[in-house]
Image (tube, rainbow, N blue to C red):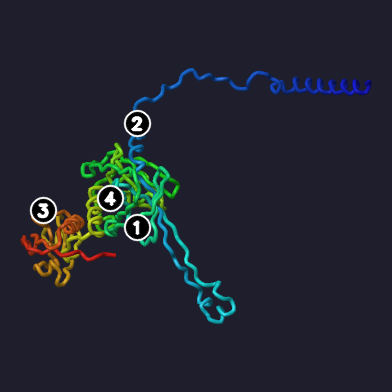
Amino acid sequence: MYRLWLFFAQTATVLLAIFFVVSTLRPDLLSWRPRGEVVTITQVAPAVTADRPDSYAKAAEIAMPSVVNVFTSKEVKELAPPLLDDPTFRRFFGEQFESRPKRTFSLGSGVIVSPSGYILTNHHVIEAADEVEVALIDGRKAKAKLIGSDPETDLAVLKIKMEDLPAMVFGQSQQVKVGDVVLALGNPFGVGQSVTMGIISALSRSGVGINTFEDFIQTDAAVTPGNSGGALTDASGNLIGINTAIYSRSGGSLGIGFAIPIHVANQIMEKIIQSGSVIRGWLGVSMQDLTEELAESFGLENLSGALIASVLKDGPADKAGIKPGDILIAIEGKLLKNSSEMLNQVAALPPGDTVTVTVIRNHQEKSFPVKVGVRPKQR
């Protein structure tokens, strides 16, 4: 008992000594007061009961269910090294070294545009795919059937069989203006559905070199790989374009994205659904824009129109008497500004119809009746 009491006394003495030293040298370590000031929040913002004027949450809520992730796969057979094709090698090692197919996967986005299951996306998203699967934001998935595609506008139409599909409402893409706020929706880099915001930077952008037929809406809303085929909407969540490409040096967004206006995409979609492809008018000529030097050499006062650089032998224009060097300025009396506008106008002509083409030849206007042909399929 004595030893136990002695041990307790010695322990208490040591602890008191440690307490004395610490309280003398570092009293802050023994302070019972909090080290920082306690701040009491007395004001809390009221709950938001109405739409905020600085928020696009309502537009995103309307549009997001209609945007789908598009997953494509393709079977690729790897070529075996020449040694593996040697009969002697195979005799000893059997067929274990036979070339085996593998599947490659890619992703993009699409937009449900009809309750019956039609989906708009880009041609390059589904190009050469063996299988296409789409995933909705609510978790549902379905195999998609390719109805048809149009490489020259980079559009494709898919269809899925599923009930209660949320189709996006078409906006007025012909009435949008530079400076309008837009939202870009898609599946960037496969991270999941995302929404970015920007403005319309330019309209009727052509000559970019992306597609044969170009009439793009340009936007600075961030669009990155995986967003292709996704939706560009107005501030109310209405569809005004299909995101198709970006200008980039690194693969990421540099603030220049291009979308196909929905009024153009809708025309292409209807033709694909009706016939599986797009049939366009054709004159059988190649054209180029007029430069100041060319206009001066031809004695022209403005740069409107397009120079006919070549005429296909026995094509519609050749049969009508149009020659290389003519300046094509109008079709059916409608004046046209450049070769891109001319190309779009000709493509919209019904094959088999006869139209009046106006050209300038030797400083004089001449008109030729031309029977519109069918534009050959382009790769």
**Mark 4 / mark 3, whichever is N-terminal:** 4
| Camera-nearest residue between 350 and 26 | 350
Secondary structure beneath dot 4 equals strand
Q: Residues within 10 Å of mark 3 (few under 14, many from 20)?
A: few
| Camera-nearest residue between 99 and 21 | 99
The amino acid type, in three-letter code, at marker 4 is Ile
Task: State the image coordinates of residue 193 (x, y, percent, origin top left).
Answer: 41, 44
Residue 212 versus residue 197 in the image, above or below: below
In the rendered image, which residue does mark 4 sit on? Answer: 260
In the rendered image, which residue does mark 1 sit on? Answer: 124
The amino acid type, in three-letter code, at marker 1 is His
In the rendered image, which residue does mark 3 sit on? Answer: 334
Task: State the image coordinates of residue 102 (x, y, percent, origin top left).
Answer: 47, 64
**Mark 3 / mark 2, whichever is N-terminal:** 2
**Mark 3 / mark 1, whichever is N-terminal:** 1
Instruction: Residue at the far right: name it.
Output: 2
14 sits left or right of 377 in the view:
right
How far separated are the C-alphas under marks 1 and 4?
14 Å
Secondary structure beneath dot 3 equals strand
In the rendered image, which residue does mark 2 sit on? Answer: 54
